[in-house]
Image (cartoon, grey):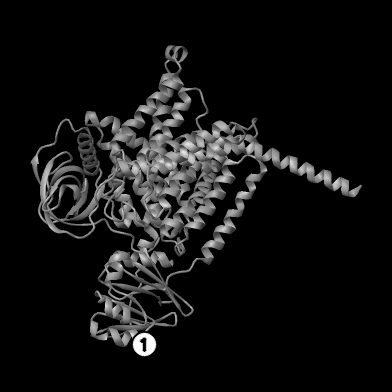
Amino acid sequence: MARSTRWREVLRWRSRAIGWVREDAATLSIWTPVFIGLGVGVYFSLKTEPTFFVGVAGLVISFVLLAVMPKYRSACAALMMASLGFAAADWRTEQVATPVLDRDIGIRAIEGRIYSVERSAKRERLVIDVHSIARVDPADTPKRIRVTWRGERSTVAAGDDVTLRAGLSPPPPPAAPGSFDFARQLYFQSIGAVGFAVTTPISTQDVDGSYFRARIENIRTGLTRRIIEAAPGQGGAIVAAVVTGKREAISEASRAALRDAGLAHLLAISGLHMGLATGLVFFAVRGLLAAIEPVAIRFPIKKCAAAAALLSGLVYLLLSGAAWSPRRAFIMTAVFFLAILFDRRAFSLRNVAIAASIILVTTPEALVHPGFQMSFAAVTALIAVFEWWNRVADPSRDFSLSARLKRYAAGLGVTDLVSSLATAPYALFHFNRVAVFSLPANILSMPLMGLWIMPAAVIGLLLTPFGLDGPAWVIAAKGVDVVLAIGAEVSSWPGAVSVTPQWPVAALIAITVGGLWFCLARSPLRLAGGLSIPAAALLVAAAPTPDLFVSASGKNIGVVGTIAGEQQIIPYSKRRDKFSIRVWNEVIGADPSKDTKITGPFGDCDDAGCARTVAGRRIAVINRSGALAEDCARADLVIAVYPVRKFDADACAAVLIDNWSVWKNGAHAVYFRGRDVVTKTVNDARGSRPWSDGGPKR
């Protein structure tokens, strides 16, 4: 009898579990961007470029399976979405394809058209659509280049045809295996070379009036200058960044204060700014129309307000430069207002899924960018909590002023807490740091952003055509000054920033899958998503930290040591590869912003090089061939800051890294594991992709 009862209980739980699975399967539509992202992620994880037919074949196969196996339509639909993501990423790579320089080519004469200009007090950064580069074959000429000019300010503007001389080199590869790939980011902007101008850019033809993008770019530049002139100082510079997306006037001190206080998201035009700007227009237009009784009675004023907000979002998108980050914000916002126009719920996970799917199909490279990951992590978590709260909230709640203020304060705190928790793993993965006190900083700053800064900025934009915008920019800048003061205060608190060694990709994938399952699933099975947290923690704890780095130039080495009681990179040269040294500190979990003084030599040094012990293993750094044979016999690892002949390299008993190694394989990370010396290189991690080996080679 007892056995029969236990069996019935098992069957009951089995039936309940099957019901939960079916309940979650019924919400497959909100998982669409997850499967598209899976396909995109598989594409970017490959070490070699696939043929285009791989994604197409996946789409055809999944469609056929869907037709002949309707019982498994959910699995077939998931396969179809993953194939779509893979094909979209492959197609996008073809669309932006550009030749990429594979070596430094020195100073060359360049002719082209200005695509965009960013100006600060010390430099100009020009992106140029290239017409020709002296002594470079047209087939090998990048579509675009990015050059920096540090001399007397030029007068060139977007759309101008220009000539200049500049030293060009390939886009910079990662400074360490697994670190951020700037070359890949630039490739998807069709930029195949970077460098420094040595002559003033000279305009050979004024801006082409038919070049729409150039006209918008020059409007942005003029508006930026107008805002900064009306409100000098960092407040005006940040207001200009919020309005036009041009951040070159923001000082490093302001960036650091906002970053360490968890307010860096205020600098980039994101869903927050787009939502605030369009939301202000929506409520202002709706309130104005509601005040006109005949209009309020005869017309759907809510839809009229949504249409006005949608139009204002489009204008804001153009003013921001229409980079993919503002495009992402506009798509998300547009989906919400379109839902109002078509009598659908504005805030729902389904709308988030639509926005994410559009972005991943049109700009698949967004998947690997921290902005996309953090933005959608925050909005998905917030809407999931919002929907849960609507299900459990008391419909008869108090609507008095005091009750509303309490709910506003509670909602603000919950919003900041949820968004901070949702984005923290991505901040730790990409930046190796997280602002510990971001919650109080955001609770204090967000009301200022929503009730002071953005309203003044919107009013300023509306008054700009009439020349009456100056006071509005000053008011907005005063609000930013208060936010900067909050950021400076919070970032100065002891322990304001927590740093961590570089996370393995597997840890981020684990916590992403768990977080998505927790937010998107509907049955009690969603609680299983919480298991991703200990799983990710174990993966992070098990990930080894490098003991030594070699830069991509082959001219500098960094070993992990202790300075003033803290783990820090000790470089072979303090002057070379400074950016690489900063990245190495981030990889090992040291705070690169701390001014830790490095005293004493790199090791036991003489004219031939240096020797020191790292993790119990003897390493030698040599700068001339005369010391090679001796050091190869005594050391476990020999690093030569010059190219070693193959015969000498083969005769070396130690592990040898020389200039040939880094020129071929990129920057190195070295791990000492017992008696083994394990090396990982940038090119091992990147593989042979269009952005890493000179452009597409199908």
The one of 591 and 30 positioned closer to us in this rendering: 30
The amino acid type found where label 1 is placed reads Arg
Residue 66, compared with residue 124, is above or below; it is: above
The one of 363 and 207 positioned closer to us in this rendering: 363
Q: Position of residue 240 (x, y in %)?
A: 28, 43
Q: Is residue 60 left or right of residue 182?
A: right
Q: Is residue 338 left or right of residue 195?
A: right
Q: Position of residue 457 (x, y in %)?
A: 33, 37
Q: Is residue 157 left or right of residue 288?
A: left
| Neighbour tally class for label 1: few under 14, some 14-19, many 20 plus, Cα within 10 Å | some
Count of all numbered marks drawn on residues in the image: 1
The one of 248 and 588 positioned closer to us in this rendering: 588
The one of 259 and 193 positioned closer to us in this rendering: 193
Q: Which residue is mark 1?
A: 634
> Which of the 4 quarters of the picture holds residue 448?
top left
Determine if residue 118 is in view.
no
Q: Residue furthest left?
A: 204
> Which of the 4 quarters of the picture holds residue 321?
top left
Q: Is residue 549 left or right of residue 205?
A: right
Q: Name the residue rendered at 52%, 44% in the picture.
A: 415
Q: Position of residue 667 (x, y in %)?
A: 33, 66
Determine if residue 377 is in view.
yes
Residue 622, compared with residue 396, is above or below; it is: below
Q: Secondary structure at mark 1?
A: helix
Q: Position of residue 294 (x, y in %)?
A: 43, 11
> Which of the 4 quarters of the picture holds residue 212?
top left
